Image: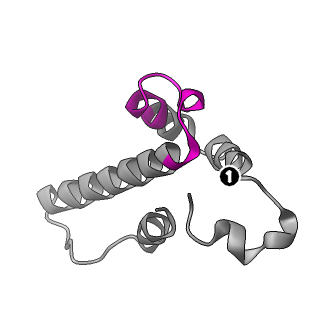
Amino acid sequence: MAKGLTTKCPNHQYIEEQLVEYFCSGLLDDEADHIDAASNGSITKLDVETVWELIKEVALKRENRRRRTRAVKGIATNESDPMMEKLASDIV
């Protein structure tokens, strides 16, 4: 479950499955492909908590890969992507 997404705006009364669907529908094609591949084909077969955990793992892996790529190119790696950090901290 995504931390705080349902408690920040409870008046919207979204159920967790809807939040997963809305989140995943906003992904770029390659990001959606990574999520589907990590879930062995399709996230629709997984429970909501497992999907959020999977999204978190994929986001962290992509952030680590980005940092490694920057290090190889000789770019300072002590800065992090605030969007990726927020995503990782917002997801259980």
Closer to the camera in the image, 8 or 30? 8
Residue segment shown in magenta: 34-49
Quarter-wise, where is residue 79 in the image?
A: bottom left
Closer to the camera in the image, 73 or 53? 53
Q: Name the residue at 64% across, 47% down.
A: 20
Residue 39 vertical position relative to residue 64 in the rendered view, above or below: above
Q: Name the residue at 49% across, 65% down.
A: 87
Q: How is the image coloured?
A: one colour
Residue 5 lies, in percent from the top left, at: 66, 67
Q: Name the residue at 13% across, 64% down.
A: 74
Residue 50 vertical position relative to residue 77 in the rendered view, above or below: above
Q: How many marks?
A: 1
How packed is label 1: few (under 14 Cα within 10 Å), some, or many (20 or more)?
Answer: some
Residue 3 vertical position relative to residue 24 in the rendered view, above or below: below
In the displayed structure image, the side of residue 58 where residue 65 appears, left or right: left
Q: Name the residue at 20% across, 68% down.
A: 75
Element at label 1: helix
In the displayed structure image, the side of residue 25 where residue 66 appears, left or right: left
Q: Which residue is mark 1?
A: 16
Residue 24 lies, in percent from the top left, at: 62, 43
Closer to the camera in the image, 3 or 57? 3
Residue 31 vertical position relative to residue 64 in the rendered view, above or below: above
Q: Is residue 22 magenta?
A: no
Q: Quadrant of the N terminus?
A: bottom right
Residue 44 lies, in percent from the top left, at: 60, 30
Residue 41 lies, in percent from the top left, at: 47, 22
Per the picture, the main secondary structure of the magenta-coloured stretch is helix
